[in-house]
Amino acid sequence: MIRFLAFFLFFSVILFKPLDTSAQITGPLPPDSFNSLSQNSVSNMGALGDTLWVGPLLMRNIRNDINFVFPENADSIAAGRGRLFSIDLAPDTVFVGLGFNDMLAGASVQTGLGFHTSVDGGETWDYIPPPLDDPDDTVFVYGGRQLEALPVIVPQQSPPFNVTFRGSTVFFAGWASGIRRSLDFGETWERILLPPTGVNLLRPQDNVDFVFDPRTDNNFLGFSVMIDSQNRVWAGTASGINISDDAMTAPTDSISWRNSRRGSSPNSLLGNWIIRIKENPHDNGVWMTNWISAQGDEQGLVVTRDGGFTFTRHLAGERLYDISFDGETIYASGDNGLFISPDNGATWNQIRQITTPNTFIKESANYLSLARTTDRLWVGTSDGLASTADGGETWQITRVNFPLEGGNQFFPDARSVDAYAYPNPFSPRVHQLTRIKFEAPADGNATIRLYDFGMNLIRELDSNVLVTSGQTYEAVWDGTDAAGRLTANGPVFYVIRAGGREARGKILVLE
């Protein structure tokens, strides 16, 4: 139903020069932590005050501590297959949308698993099963008229992509499940009718007659939802943005909606698939990331400051996932890095690759999620979690921490080693690079040499990096030999030398 087209438009940005990351030793690394992240790809986050929540296993971090605490009482995550798909926060209150990837007809399908809620800051959790329709719910009453409706009776293709709440009123956007509302903090749920595609206004007094079926209308496919500071509800679908002044309180058969879609005017949306909706507390501007859902669409970022009647376009051509704010400073994350506007969208700078003195996010990484704690911006990427306390001038990068001595909270009984490589097995085309983590065997200049199965030298990595005995370092290798050619499949042995001492390991290269 939805077609993806590739568009790329050039715009003025400030480019930050990436590191030469093909063969490099960096470090020393920060201290090891037993309470580590669960994985390096961070696609969903939430923050309130000094507390950060990180997916996919709902890890909690407070005040940029070295520890990421796992919520053992959230059983659907701790002992089940649930993963963080969405989150919304209020003081001491956490509402989490859960999902997982199921196999259906040989294909992976995103599937709803329900919700976890906590009213004590995440110490204890309650579980809410996924809201589904009764198979006999084939009629939806709106404005006193009966509309034919397709009941959504299975959780497949109905994951809670977005959740928002105000008091005890909760909304979630669940793709095939559309937009659902609860007036009792998730105890019971109601299905919400949106306008069919092409209908700009849906009001109970109008004479409407259509079929409520998400298989045939993109505006019934819910992807994002937000309650703004005026208690308006914004519902993003694969067919535009829908805005309601009364969805917080009106009965389901009486909620009015106004739909805006991409049009010929430059003041319309860029694309009709609305991925993320967020309001800037600084001036109450509502920002949205737009993706392509039909021919003629573009992707990028828009903002409206008049309630969704007109939109200002930004970063046209960029595939963006998330938005965050710090006063007039706007942040947007996407496939091509992090974009920063210091002046409310008037100009934009681009950070294509985040680097620190001792590590970096790889060049091919996608920048997937954003969150802001009291004094830090957090950027979730496909290659780790980055954060900055100075607007992007300097960075801290956190990845899964698997100490050389022992394991972490997920693998507490792992044996101690002198060095290891990850990912391993390693595919240069898929992973771009592998990292070799090692403890310096002695003081001196470190040299890492890579050999094939016949112990023929493939490549030598940095040879003039001074290391300190007992400190941990990391080297990267892109899978090529000294001439820049991809290494053949098979085992590759590495030897780390410093101060006359050695550490060894093996990488399995597979294409």
Image: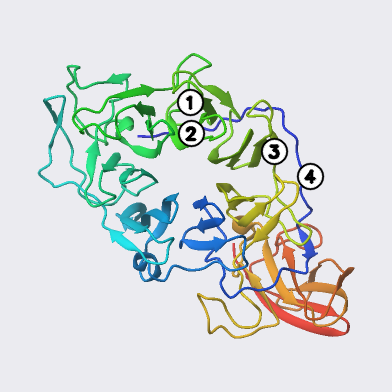
Q: Residue furthest top?
A: 265
Q: CA distance from mark 2 to mark 3?
A: 19 Å
In terms of secondary structure, where does tag 2 sit?
A: strand
Q: For the point 42% across and 66% down, which residue is it?
A: 123
Residue pointed to by mark 2: 291
Residue pointed to by mark 4: 17
Q: For the point 24% across and 50% down, which residue is it?
A: 131
Q: Nearer the viewer, residue 172 or 338?
A: 172
> In the image, is 95 to the left or to the right of 330?
left
Amino acid type of the residue that numbered disc 3 sits on in the rendered structure:
Gln
Badge nearest the viewer, 1 or 4: 4
Q: CA distance from mark 1 to mark 4?
A: 31 Å
Q: For the point 12% across and 41% down, which residue is it?
A: 137
In terms of secondary structure, where does tag 3 sit?
A: strand
Q: Mark on residue 74?
A: none
Against 261, is 61 above or below? below
Q: CA distance from mark 4 to mark 3?
A: 11 Å
Q: Mark on residue 350?
A: 3
In the picture, which quadrant includes the C terminus? bottom right
Q: For the point 70% across and 62% down, which residue is it?
A: 479
